[in-house]
Amino acid sequence: MLVVGGCRVDDLTAEFGTPVLVVDEGALRRRAREYLHQFRSRRPGSDVAFASKAFPCTAIQRLMAEEGLHLDVAGGGEIVTALAAGADPARLVLHGNAKTDEELELAVRSGVGLVVVDNFDDVDRLERIVPRGHTQACLVRVIPGVDATTHASVATGHAGSKFGLMPDDARDAISRIERSGVLRCDGLHTHVGSQLLNVEQLAAAVAPLAALGTFDVYDLGGGLGVRYTYDEHPPTLADYAEAMVSAADALLPTGSRIIVEPGRSMVATSACTLYRVTTVKRGELTHVAVDGGMGDNLEVSLYGQRFEATVADRVGGGARVNLVGRHCESGDQLIDGVSLRDPTVGDVIAVPVTGAYCYTMSNQYNGARRIPVVFADGGTARLVVRRDTWDDLLARDVP
């Protein structure tokens, strides 16, 4: 029987039902500590900011804050959950290409440490919102002009990206911030994309920042890819840290602080989703249907992301089948051509590496109830996000 965080999978599903997203809490804490160690051992003073959008759960944000990480928050909602998690607002980095007045007012009022200026309208809003006598620290987001090898929907560093400013416009934004009287440009930010398996492409973003001048802070974003399938072999965290710090040491001012913002590579491999088989339909293709799908894992439909799976008590091997979800869409295919050993109705199916963006994009399509999140550690499991109730489906209705 498969075990997660010291807990048997059959015990977890008996207690919490299915589908359920299970996080190995100990593994996640070790990953956070490893990130800090790999960067700070190479460049003292480096900071790691967890990209909350990858898993914007209050319990996850609290864990990251406890481990000494900053939090990258993408919008007002993630500010609210980060504050509820007990995070120090001064250790938050606010992102967004279309920040509203309400979000910036919340950020300034809450004392968010760094606001990433993505466009000139951000400067206009901040000049209007930040009270006189107060100074808001900012980073200017720069498009590095790196064409990343990844899915087009998660590439962000190329010319024409909706995020950030080209270098000449970034210079103008820096000048405007310096003249504002209420804003301070502490440095620069960049991001190449997500699920990158080439550290050279990630490190290539450093040179365009260095060309813009000397600053106290250089936020190099995240983007390191993870191993979703047996065929993928991403760089190690040590490889990534070595590439980024080497580029920083060669090109950035001595004593400047670098920040990295891991999301996917921080949380993806620490979690798995457990389902129960509801139907096995044999014919031209064998379809094994489970009690979840695109309501709890939209990565497949959006990005064509490939996953692996196994029957929890018959790990590995078996004939190839199509693992499908319960939603009324032909595109609700969790994994095409995955090997499962003699799947039958009632079996528990484990899909690993679901810690990134699955919770983020969970939804109530077809009236599905959003699934719970469970932390497992040392043989003990605890609920940190409950399953939706039927009443939750009606909670926002106005009579």
Image (cartoon, rainbow, N blue to C red):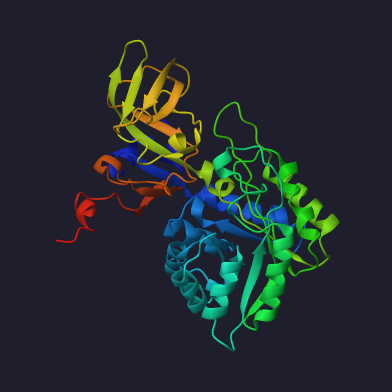
Residue lying at 59% horizontally and 46% vertically, measured from the top left: 265
Front in this rendered view, residue 46 or 78:
78
Q: Position of residue 18 (x, y in %)?
A: 31, 38
When asked about the image quadrant of residue 221, the answer is bottom right
Front in this rendered view, residue 170 or 26:
170
Q: Residue furthest right?
A: 250
Front in this rendered view, residue 248 or 383:
248
Front in this rendered view, residue 140 or 113:
140
Whether residue 45 appears in this view of the structure is no
Q: Position of residue 243 (x, y in %)?
A: 77, 47
When asked about the image quadrant of residue 341, the answer is top left
Q: Residue furthest top?
A: 284
Residue lying at 68% horizontally and 74% vertically, measured from the top left: 176
When asked about the image quadrant of residue 20, the answer is top left
Residue lying at 76% horizontally and 59% vertically, measured from the top left: 209
Residue lying at 33% horizontally and 36% vertically, measured from the top left: 292
Q: Position of residue 236 (x, y in %)?
A: 68, 41
162 displayed left or right of 336: right
Whether residue 89 appears in this view of the structure is yes
Q: Quadrant of the N terminus?
A: top left
Q: Quadrant of the C terminus?
A: bottom left
Rendered view: 380 above or below 331: below
Q: Position of residue 21 (x, y in %)?
A: 39, 43
Q: Residue furthest left?
A: 399
